[in-house]
């Protein structure tokens, strides 16, 4: 395998370890500065130049994109994707994880534990938002902060108001997040590679510091995760579209609370703490997947008139409850069931004899007209408000 590592820091620990692991396994590897690429687009197809020369062929790319170059870095990764080069992380996955609000918005619909979070712009919405997430103390975060930068703990409502007002006056977008008291000063980081957690550690803040990041002096210890933490970490990475990720979780009373998902996790702390070859696990995964580049389904389906992908729900009282998938997945319907979602379970390529239950969701590809007839009429769900407040017409 010929591997390119996209990095502006060739001497960084993580970059050097990934190169070392690749070379030990007999792969050819080169570190390419992300900012030295030129992107060419024309009718003949996408192309890349590196330092004014046409880029030679690579089998795979592993992006290590810093937050300061997110836009250009993901553009380069996206170009590799269009050239059918396998990317350790996709441009879309990197963008999803880089924005804290965006990542929590995506995770919030998938029955994954996250701290209660609010995002507001109007100063009149600040107090109600603080109340909705559980009241003071609250955590205030910049949407694109890294390594604990831009994460503040406000002990009182007054302090929270002042911090938010100051940050908003500087044109900063901030999140208001519930303070998970039982996890104060500690969190768990899991390194996800593919569908496995290959290493995990607990980070513990020192002194009066509540942020546990290693860059802020936090101490680390190896930890064996229970199945619910492993499942939460893997599902979070996959839902955001990441193949390689560092998933940070708070240890809440009700189980794991996803705090952040990092698309370019540092390897020094986790390898030192766990004594595991995390870099090697990443290289082995890429080598095993290199023949399966990312396919943008939306692009491919635009050439199929009348066909597409849709999610069909099976509500209580549906005629499909108690029947098998074979009643949907038929040549007459021209529909193929790709995945069955049942509670928190994901069942790919389900057997046609599997019996459907109320609440199941089916991801299907096929004739849109046939699927349209199967989609139940949407009913607006009435939600119990978190706090007593006057309703208003939007």
Image: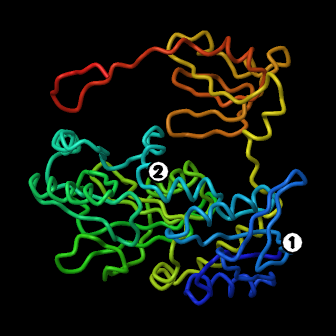
Dot 1 or dot 2: first in sequence order is: 1
Could you say whether the residue bearing mark 1 is in a helix, strand or loop?
loop
Q: Is residue 304 above or below residue 52?
A: above
Q: Nearer the viewer, residue 174 or 342?
A: 174
- Relative to residue 184, is residue 382 drawn left or right? right
Question: Residue shown at 52%/84% (left/top)?
Answer: 275
Circle 2 is placed at which residue position?
103
For the residues labelled 1 and 2, the Cα–Cα distance comes to 33 Å
> Residue 114 in the image: x percent, y percent?
36, 49
How crowded is the residue under tag 1: few (<14 C-alpha within 10 Å), some, or many (20+)? few
Rendering quarter of residue 35: bottom right
> Residue 266 in the image: x percent, y percent?
51, 76
Residue lying furthest right = 44
Select label 1 or label 2 by which is in front. Answer: 1
Question: Residue shown at 70%/18% (left/top)?
Answer: 371
Could you say whether the residue bearing mark 2 is in a helix, strand or loop?
helix
Rendering quarter of residue 32: bottom right
Mark 1 vs 2: CB contact within 8 A: no
- Relative to residue 381, is residue 28 drawn left or right? right
Residue lying furthest bottom = 11
Rendering quarter of residue 59: bottom right
Circle 1 is placed at which residue position?
57
- Relative to residue 66, is residue 132 drawn left or right? left
Q: Quadrant for the C terminus, please.
A: top left
Q: Quadrant for the N terminus, please.
A: bottom right
Q: Is residue 344 above or below residue 235?
A: above
């Amino acid at each position: 395998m010929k591997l390119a590592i996209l990095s502006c820091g060739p001497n960084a620990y993580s970059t050097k370890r990934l190169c070392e692991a690749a070379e030990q396994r007999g792969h050819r590897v080169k570190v390419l500065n992300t900012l030295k690429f030129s992107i060419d687009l024309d009718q003949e197809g996408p192309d890349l130049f590196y330092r004014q020369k046409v880029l030679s062929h690579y089998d795979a790319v592993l992006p290590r994109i810093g937050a300061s170059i997110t836009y250009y870095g993901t553009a380069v990764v996206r170009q590799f994707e269009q050239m059918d080069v396998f990317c350790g992380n996709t441009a879309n996955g990197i963008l999803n994880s880089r924005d804290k609000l965006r990542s929590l918005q995506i995770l919030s619909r998938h029955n994954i534990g996250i701290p209660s979070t609010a995002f507001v712009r109007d100063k009149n919405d600040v107090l109600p938002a603080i109340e909705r997430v559980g009241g003071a103390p609250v955590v205030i975060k910049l949407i694109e902060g890294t390594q604990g930068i831009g994460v503040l703990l406000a002990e009182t409502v007054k302090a929270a108001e002042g911090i938010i007002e100051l940050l908003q006056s500087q044109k900063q977008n901030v999140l208001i997040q519930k303070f998970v008291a039982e996890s104060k000063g500690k969190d768990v980081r899991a390194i996800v590679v593919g569908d496995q957690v290959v290493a995990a550690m607990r980070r513990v803040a020192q002194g009066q510091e509540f942020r546990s990041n290693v860059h802020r002096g936090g101490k680390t210890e190896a930890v064996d995760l229970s199945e619910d933490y492993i499942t939460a970490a893997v599902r979070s990475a996959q839902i955001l579209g990441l193949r390689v990720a560092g998933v940070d979780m708070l240890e809440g009373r009700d189980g794991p609370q996803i705090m952040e998902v990092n698309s370019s996790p540092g390897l020094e702390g986790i390898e030192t703490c766990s004594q595991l070859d995390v870099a090697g696990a990443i290289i082995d995964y890429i080598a095993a997947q290199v023949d399966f580049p990312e396919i943008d389904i939306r692009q491919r389906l635009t050439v199929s008139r009348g066909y597409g992908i849709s999610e069909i729900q099976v509500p209580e009282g549906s005629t499909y409850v108690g029947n098998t998938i074979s009643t949907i997945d038929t040549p007459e319907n021209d529909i193929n069931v790709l995945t069955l979602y049942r509670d928190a379970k994901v069942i790919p390529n389900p057997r046609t004899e599997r019996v459907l239950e109320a609440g199941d969701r089916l991801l299907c590809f096929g004739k849109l007209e046939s699927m349209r007839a199967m989609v139940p009429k949407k009913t607006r769900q009435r939600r119990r408000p978190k706090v007593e407040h006057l309703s208003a017409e939007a």
